[in-house]
Each structure stands twice: as structure tokens, then as C-alpha cells.
């Protein structure tokens, strides 16, 4: 008897679990200010996207490009001059806060993992940050795609030479 077993691949999209929040402001290409609507009192909280590093705003044009792209990804409409920032799901990993007291999270909007989208489009690089490694493989694959395609910071005509630290 011959048994054939097919390799099953997992879907690239998973159902996120976490807190629902309303984006108030995009601070940079890796940081948002949000209001977690289920918490009382509802306070503005900073959220740092896990597993990625976007160029700082001083690193032109990459820093402002990353911030604008994150604004586009969280907006509910196409008015880029005055975006209507949307509702997101903030998914934690092992650590909930960083040394700056920002919430560490994977951020989902309309079924898409924004951490992954920023990396895949070349606006940020994937940086695994143990113990928060839930989506490290997805982020690594997204970075490989952006690098091969020469997108954003990987553009051979205008590559980003280095990232500055926080």
C-alpha cells in the first residue's frame, strides 16, 4: 500500500486576535498613537510595530516615505491630504511594552498585517526581536521579496545605506 501525503501550506493571512483601537496619529513609519476603545478610561497610547525598523524621519526621503505609507495603510479613504485614520487590531506577542513604555504589537487593518506590508513594500526592514517572534518568518519572507524586487529602501538607484538607532 502506497500512501501519498500532500504538503499543506498555511494561509498567509491568519485571523488576528487582540485589542481594537482607533488610530489617532501616525508618529513615524513604525509608531502609532491609538485609543484602545475597550479600555476605560480610553487614553492615547503609543504603539511600536514589532519586528520591523523603519528609517527615522531625519533620514530623507526614506523616513517620511515610511510614515506616509503607514498613514496610507491605516486610512479608511483615499484622501491623502486629510486621511480618515481607521480602526485597527493591536496583537501582542510575549512582551507587551518596550523600554519607552510603548505597547509592542503586530498591527492589523482590514485583514492585513501592516508590519508585513511595510517590509514587503520596502519601507522598513525586518528585525527579529526575541522573544517577540510570532511572525518573524513572514517578515523575513516579505523582506526577501522587497530586496529582490528592489523596492523602497532596497532600490538600487537610491538605496538606504544604514538605519540610525532609536
Image (cartoon, rainbow, N blue to C red):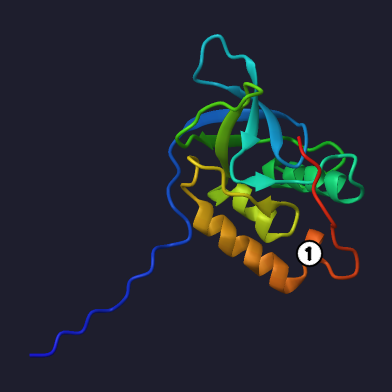
Q: Residue furthest left?
A: 1
Residue at 85% in and 51% down: 62
Residue at 56% in and 36% down: 105
The vertical placement of 82 against 24, above or below, is below
On the image, the x and y values in percent for residue 134 come to 46, 47
Q: In terms of depth relative to the viewer, which is nearer, 107 or 51?
A: 51
Residue at 50% in and 41% down: 132
Q: Secondary structure at mark 1?
A: helix
For residue 23, which quarter of the picture? top right
For residue 57, which quarter of the picture? top right
On the image, the x and y values in percent for residue 162 come to 82, 52
Pointer 1: residues within 10 angstroms few (<14), some, or many (20+)? many
Q: Residue furthest top?
A: 41
Residue at 65% in and 61% down: 143
Q: Residue furthest bottom?
A: 1
On the image, the x and y values in percent for residue 34 come to 65, 26
Indicate the quadrant containing the N terminus: top left, top right, bottom left or bottom right.
Answer: bottom left
Q: In terms of depth relative to the viewer, which is nearer, 90 or 119?
A: 119
Q: How many marks?
A: 1
Q: In terms of depth relative to the viewer, which is nearer, 105 or 11?
A: 105
The residue tagged 1 is 154
Indicate the quadrant containing the C terminus: top left, top right, bottom left or bottom right.
Answer: top right
Q: In this image, 26 relative to 110: left or right?
A: right
The vertical placement of 153 against 77, above or below, is below
Amino acid at each position: 500500500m502506497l500512501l501519498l501525503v500532500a504538503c499543506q501550506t498555511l494561509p498567509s493571512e491568519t485571523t488576528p486576535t487582540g485589542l481594537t483601537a482607533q488610530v489617532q496619529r501616525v508618529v513615524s513609519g513604525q509608531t502609532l498613537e491609538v485609543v484602545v476603545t475597550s479600555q476605560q478610561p480610553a487614553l492615547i497610547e503609543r504603539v511600536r510595530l514589532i519586528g520591523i525598523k523603519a528609517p527615522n524621519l531625519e533620514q530623507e526621503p526614506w523616513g517620511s516615505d515610511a510614515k506616509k505609507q503607514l498613514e496610507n495603510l491605516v486610512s479608511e479613504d483615499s484622501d491623502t491630504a486629510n486621511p480618515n485614520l481607521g480602526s485597527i487590531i493591536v496583537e501582542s506577542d510575549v512582551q507587551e511594552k518596550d523600554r519607552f513604555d510603548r505597547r509592542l504589537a503586530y498591527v492589523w487593518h482590514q485583514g492585513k498585517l501592516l508590519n508585513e506590508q511595510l517590509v514587503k513594500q520596502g519601507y522598513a526592514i525586518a528585525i527579529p526581536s526575541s522573544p517577540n517572534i510570532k511572525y518573524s518568518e513572514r517578515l523575513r519572507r516579505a523582506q526577501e521579496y522587497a530586496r529582490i524586487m528592489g523596492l523602497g529602501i532596497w532600490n538600487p538607484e537610491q538605496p538606504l545605506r544604514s538605519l540610525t538607532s532609536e
